[in-house]
Image (cartoon, grey):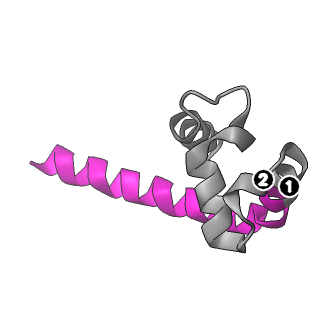
Amino acid sequence: MIFYALRLLWVSTRGYRLRPWLSPFLRWRIETYTGIPAESVTFTIFLREMWKARRELAQFLRWGADMRQMERQTQSRS
């Protein structure tokens, strides 16, 4: 599970890995998920929203891990 979380973070913060709250992709996701304008996302807002959504993020990561496992099983059968 941690591998998938780190992989998601690595991919989604390309170019902004040391400052993920400045990532246009993550700002856009926060805006669409919470309604907070992307331009106003700061470090504090980023952390607060990630903390609030931690259960949903964990559920998404589990779903992503399941999909990846199903993909690998399908590929190994081919």
The answer to whether 24 appears left or right of 43 in the picture is left
Instruction: Return the mark for residue 75.
Output: none
Q: Secondary structure at mark 2?
A: loop
In this rendered view, identify the residue nearer to me: 29 or 67: 29
Q: Quadrant of residue 10?
A: top right
Q: Is residue 37 above or below residue 47?
A: below
Q: Residues within 10 Å of mark 2 (few under 14, many from 20)?
A: many
Q: Position of residue 15 (x, y in %)?
A: 56, 27
In this rendered view, identify the residue nearer to me: 33 or 4: 33
Q: Secondary structure at mark 1?
A: helix
* Residue labelled with disc 2: 41
Q: Is residue 58 visible?
A: no
Q: Amino acid at mark 2?
A: Val
Q: Residues within 10 Å of mark 1 (few under 14, many from 20)?
A: some
Q: Which residue: 61% across, 70% down?
A: 32
Q: Position of residue 46 (x, y in %)?
A: 80, 51
- Residue range highlighted in magenta: 49-78
Q: Quadrant of residue 4?
A: top right
Q: Is residue 13 above or below residue 34?
A: above
Q: Which residue: 57% across, 63% down?
A: 60
Q: Is residue 51 above or below residue 44?
A: below
Q: Which residue: 78% across, 55% down?
A: 40
Main secondary structure of the magenta stretch: helix
Q: Which residue: 48% across, 53% down?
A: 65
Q: Is residue 1 visible?
A: yes
* Residue labelled with disc 1: 45
Q: Is residue 53 magenta?
A: yes
The answer to whether 47 appears left or right of 67 in the picture is right
